[in-house]
Image (spheres, rainbow, N blue to C red):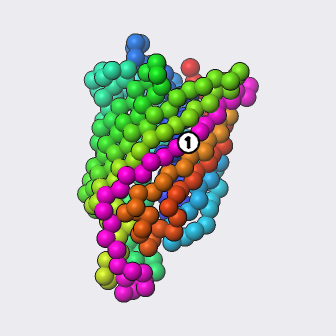
Amino acid sequence: MKTTIAIFTALLCAAPAMAQQASPDTAGSELPDRIVGDLGAGVFHLERNGLSKHSHNTVLPYAYFDYGRFFARLDTFGVKTAKLGYGYLELAGRINFEGFDADRGLHRRSDPIPLGIGTYQETPYGAFFLNAFYDFNKSHGTLAEAIYAAQVDVSRVSIYPQIGVEYRSGNYNNYFFGVDSTESAASGLRQYSAGSSTSPLLGLSADMPVFGDWRLNLTWRRKWLGNSVADSPLVHRKVEDMGLVALSYHFK
């Protein structure tokens, strides 16, 4: 379970770079009646930032494609509805395994079920990702993110600098990072109540052609955790780093 949490967090962090290379231009064209995008596999590395402090390297498949009104963006999927700017208003869900089993005196945290709305805007000035989710499971908290990715071409290599911010409500953070009095007594950790957080992030990706329609993607991402998360006794570092090396086939 803990390994899966780390990988899906890594996938989330990698999404902006993948979108630059995988999403079709839907601003002025019909929705595709075929798969358009990337399918492949990658080695994901994420530094653990919880009670387990071990880093993991894991090979996982990923899918980033559009098919008609349906889209899949690694850990985010949904349906495009009304046209909106350079993209669509989207009904979206997110695969998130942030929960964990009862351990060391801590109660079990159930995985969230984030459902909400969003949009992907591929503009002449770069790509914008805007999403807002509500956890329909135990935390009843909210998640929101705004990410911008630019593109710089150097010969045949495309480089994507990224900048963004992630917001999590107090209900969400306290459910996953808070420690109540019962847990404190059983685990020896100090009691802690987490509030809302805002976490800035920076990233850099490189997309390189290998042969034919096969591509190699290199990505690094750092997120600075908001104080209400970073100060939790369940967290041991104030930053989270992610890296990946992925090979994918691009369907046109």
Q: Is residue 62 visible?
A: yes
Residue under the image location 41 percent in, 57 percent down: 226
User: In the rendered structure, does residue 208 fall within the stretch colored magenta?
Assistant: yes
Vertical placement of residue 123 versus 205, above or below: above
Q: Secondary structure at mark 1?
A: strand
What is the span of residues highlighted in magenta in the rendered image? 184-211
Image quarter for residue 76? Answer: top left
Work out whether residue 204 or residue 97 is closer to the camera in this orientation and state it. 204
**Where is the C terminus found, in terms of image quarters?**
top right
Image quarter for residue 196? Answer: bottom left
Residue under the image location 27 percent in, 23 percent down: 82
User: In the rendered structure, does residue 14 fall within the stretch colored magenta?
Assistant: no
Q: Residues within 10 Å of mark 1 (few under 14, many from 20)?
A: many
Image quarter for residue 145? Answer: top left
x, y percent for residue 26:
42, 19
Q: Is residue 110 visible?
A: no
Q: Which residue is mark 1?
A: 203
